[in-house]
């Protein structure tokens, strides 16, 4: 019985570890200037609601509901809504 509990607990911990969000929150003021300029020019009137970063780049959410992805240098990659 103890072995079964240990196996279940191990499986649960492993699954939880695999689903960890590796993004870290970023203040808008800490975003690269290229990202802030892109948003200002491409989506006038929209505000950045939140931003997060991982090892590959940034993801931001705008007040118009769109989500944008940028690389670490602030180069636009893609948009989703």
Image (tube, rainbow, N blue to C red):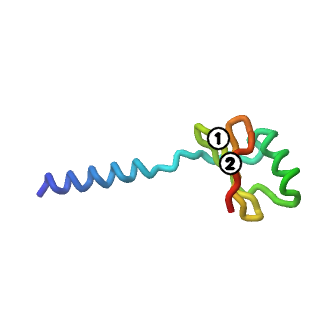
Q: Quadrant of residue 33?
A: top right
What SS does tag 2 mark?
strand
Q: Residue at horizontal 82%, vertical 60%?
A: 46
Q: Residue at horizontal 20%, vertical 51%?
A: 6
Q: Are marks 2 and 1 in contact (CB under 8 Å)?
A: yes
Q: Where does the N terminus fall, quadrant-wise?
A: bottom left
The spot of residue 21 in percent (x, y) is 51, 50
Q: Quadrant of residue 73?
A: top right
The spot of residue 10 in percent (x, y) is 27, 50
Mark 1 = which residue? 57
The spot of residue 35 in percent (x, y) is 78, 44
Q: Quick one: which residue is furthest to the left in this view?
A: 1
Q: Quadrant of residue 71?
A: top right
Residue 38 vertical placement versus 67 (above, below): above
Q: Quick one: which residue is furthest to the front in this view?
A: 78
Q: Where does the C terminus fall, quadrant-wise?
A: bottom right
Residue 12 vertical placement versus 24 (above, below): below
Label 2 environment density (alpha carbons within 10 Å; few <14, some 14–19, many ≥20) = many
Foreground of the two, 39 or 6: 39
Q: Residue at horizontal 67%, vertical 45%?
A: 26
Query: Residue 23 has which mark?
Result: none
Q: Quick one: which residue is furthest to the top in this view?
A: 73
The spot of residue 34 in percent (x, y) is 80, 40
Mark 2 = which residue? 69
* Earlier residue among tags 2 and 1: 1
Q: Is residue 32 left or right of residue 4?
A: right
Foreground of the two, 56 or 29: 56
Label 1 environment density (alpha carbons within 10 Å; few <14, some 14–19, many ≥20) = some
Separation (CA) of disc 2 from disc 1: 7 Å
């Amino acid at each position: 019985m103890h072995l079964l509990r240990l196996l279940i607990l191990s499986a649960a911990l492993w699954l939880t570890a695999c689903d960890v969000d590796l993004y870290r929150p970023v203040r808008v003021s800490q975003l690269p200037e290229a990202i802030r300029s892109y948003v200002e020019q491409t989506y006038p009137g929209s505000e950045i609601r939140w931003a997060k970063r991982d090892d590959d780049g940034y993801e931001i959410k705008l007040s118009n509901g769109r989500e944008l992805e940028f690389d670490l240098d602030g180069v636009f990659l893609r948009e989703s809504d």
